[in-house]
Image (cartoon, rainbow, N blue to C red):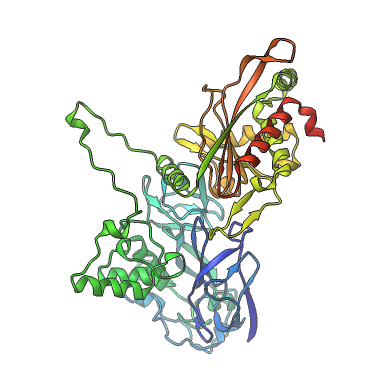
């Protein structure tokens, strides 16, 4: 027996995230892959599983703590020789609801027989969808295997497509496909069962440690001759996954753990109508019981009141009364964008500052260099110069490179410069991020913009590609218009809108001369930035674009 520190694995972000639930306590026995804690960021809720089986000796965290990759979660007592310990409930863990499979779980050797690594067993494993960086369901556009296929480790099982990306999901291990649980057109989310896979494993200490409650290490699980169905180990997680997959989509997005969801299903509670009292409005078991009690006492609060935003509701209008109509479904990215933009518009007091930059010399230089780079395939656009100029202005005015804390009492000043570029795609607007733009040359930025624009149009952007931005640029210069008011991309505090350049007469002190002018629209959060500071920022930006030699300073 030995004590082992359990660290937070890589969760796809280097930022600290909040603990909203600790599912174990000191003294608890934890199975491998059993949930230890539940984390919640602004974009997702994640259950962190145990990498080992053992007993919790010490908790290093509590609800409300913020942790990041590598932090110690708890100390666990583990044993490399778990297989030598007699199981508490022999064979009880194996799907007791399927009598036909029960004979296949019987041990073929007494518990005293020494474990042999040379022996093997064939088992059926459920392959679940790993963390794909989003809690939303995504569509399956291709199933790359069929029943009976031999699959190698890391071989593609299915292909997913969201409105932002296409992802191939690899197999975590080699085996033979037993049953497919999904088909083309299904929507799946993290944790959903994709298929069951017949795998062959050594019957030794490692296997016994993984399934201590099934049989001793010396026992060999053999498929029943009466029933060819392979044994499914870890029946409880599989049952939980099946139950969770059967959840009816609630009337609003909810935050609740598996235990709470099971309780809600048992009691017939609609979690979309339950008000959560946990951290970040997470629904607790007590909230479910309170809701049921309220229903039984015939004092249910109307769902519209529970979900109300405080704004007057818009009336329903039958437009067909005025003529022919056609109903067109919005894409998922359109619906998400509407939610984000509405939230930003409601919460942020927007102000927009307008100016024009004289880019006559810049454009002349750009055209010469663009022609020279044409053979290499690199397109040097005005946007690359804008990114460099914006970074220079952000360094001069650091409040524009910040975010306001949730309580509005502190300002988080960022020491990095990640610039978001709005990209128009057939499915809607996305904003991929160019990271560390201050450390990249004009050519590197131009090349990266080509790459992320192509990924956006091909729906191959990953969620991480659109996170962490400090400041966004939305350019409509290639389409037209003289000015517009872009909406701040929260949690950023400002955004630059760029309209179509045009030649205009400019007075040079002696006469009017035609100059190429670029319209700029700077929207900002007035809680963070004053009008005078915004005027100084956009003036500084215009001057930098007017004389690109300033970029060298």
Q: Nearer the viewer, residue 205 or 111?
A: 205
Farthest residue to the right: give it: 553
Image vertical order of residue 258 relative to residue 392, above or below = below
- The x and y percentages for residue 520 are 60, 29
- The x and y percentages for residue 140 are 41, 46
Q: Is residue 195 left or right of residue 537?
A: left
Q: Nearer the viewer, residue 372 or 401?
A: 401
Q: Nearer the viewer, residue 525 or 67?
A: 525
**x 43%, y 52%: residue:** 136
Question: Do we see residue 247 in this rendering?
Answer: no
- Quarter placement of the N terminus: bottom right
Q: Nearer the viewer, residue 214 or 269?
A: 269
Q: Is residue 503 left or right of residue 124?
A: right
Image vertical order of residue 97 relative to residue 439, above or below = below
**x 58%, y 47%: residue:** 492
Image vertical order of residue 152 relative to residue 443, above or below = below
Q: Is residue 332 left or right of residue 507?
A: left
Q: Is residue 319 left or right of residue 1?
A: left
- Quarter placement of the C terminus: top right
- The x and y percentages for residue 39 are 52, 66
Residue 511 occupies quadrant: top right
Question: Do we see residue 133 in this rendering?
Answer: yes
- The x and y percentages for residue 536 are 68, 37
| Total marks in image | 0
**x 47%, y 86%: residue:** 87
């Amino acid at each position: 027996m030995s004590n082992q520190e359990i660290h937070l694995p890589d969760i796809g972000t280097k930022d600290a995230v909040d603990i909203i639930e600790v599912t174990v306590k000191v003294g608890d026995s934890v199975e491998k892959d059993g949930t230890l804690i539940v984390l919640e960021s602004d974009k997702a809720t994640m259950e962190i599983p145990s990498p080992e089986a053992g007993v919790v000796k010490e908790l290093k965290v509590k609800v409300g703590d913020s942790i990041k990759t590598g932090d110690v979660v708890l100390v666990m007592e583990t044993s490399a020789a778990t297989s030598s310990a007699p199981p508490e409930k022999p064979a009880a863990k194996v799907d007791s609801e399927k009598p036909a499979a029960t004979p296949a779980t019987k041990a073929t050797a007494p518990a005293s027989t020494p474990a042999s690594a040379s022996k093997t067993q064939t088992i059926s494993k459920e392959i679940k969808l790993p963390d794909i960086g989003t809690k939303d369901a995504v569509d399956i556009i291709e199933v790359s295997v069929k029943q009976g296929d031999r699959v190698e480790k890391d071989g593609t099982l299915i292909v997913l497509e969201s409105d932002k990306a296409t992802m191939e999901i690899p197999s975590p291990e080699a085996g033979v496909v037993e049953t497919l649980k999904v088909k083309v057109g299904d929507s799946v989310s993290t944790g959903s069962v994709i298929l069951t896979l017949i795998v062959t494993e050594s019957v030794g200490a490692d296997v016994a440690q993984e399934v201590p409650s099934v049989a001793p290490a010396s026992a060999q699980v053999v498929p029943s001759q009466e029933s060819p169905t392979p044994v499914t180990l870890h029946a409880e997680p599989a049952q939980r996954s099946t139950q969770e997959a059967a959840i009816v989509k609630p009337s609003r997005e909810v935050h609740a753990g598996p235990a709470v969801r099971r309780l809600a299903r048992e009691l017939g509670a609609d979690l979309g109508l339950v008000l959560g009292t946990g951290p970040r409005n997470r629904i607790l078991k007590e909230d479910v019981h309170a809701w049921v009690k309220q229903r039984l006492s015939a004092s249910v609060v109307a769902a519209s009141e529970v979900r109300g935003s405080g704004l007057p509701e818009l009336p329903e209008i039958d437009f067909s009364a005025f003529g022919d109509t056609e109903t067109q479904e919005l894409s998922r990215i359109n619906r998400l964008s509407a939610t984000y933009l509405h939230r930003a518009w409601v919460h942020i007091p927007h102000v927009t500052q307008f100016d024009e930059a004289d880019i006559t010399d810049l454009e002349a230089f750009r055209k010469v260099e663009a022609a020279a780079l044409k053979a290499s395939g690199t397109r040097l656009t005005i946007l690359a110069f804008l990114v460099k100029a914006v970074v220079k202005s952000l360094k001069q005015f650091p409040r524009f490179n910040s975010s306001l804390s949730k309580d509005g009492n502190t300002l988080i000043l960022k020491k990095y410069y990640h610039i978001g570029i709005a990209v128009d795609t057939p499915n809607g607007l996305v904003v991929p991020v160019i990271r560390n733009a201050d450390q990249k040359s004009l050519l590197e930025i131009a090349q990266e913009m080509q790459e992320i624009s192509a990924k956006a149009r091909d729906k191959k952007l990953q969620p991480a590609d659109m996170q962490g931005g400090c400041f966004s640029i939305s350019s409509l210069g290639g389409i037209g218009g003289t000015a517009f008011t872009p909406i701040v991309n929260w949690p950023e505090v400002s955004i630059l809108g760029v309209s179509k350049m045009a030649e205009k007469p400019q007075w040079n002190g002696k006469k009017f001369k035609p100059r190429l002018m670029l319209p700029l629209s700077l929207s900002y959060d007035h809680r963070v930035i004053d009008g005078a500071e915004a005027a100084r920022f956009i003036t500084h930006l215009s001057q930098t674009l007017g004389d690109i030699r300033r970029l060298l300073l």
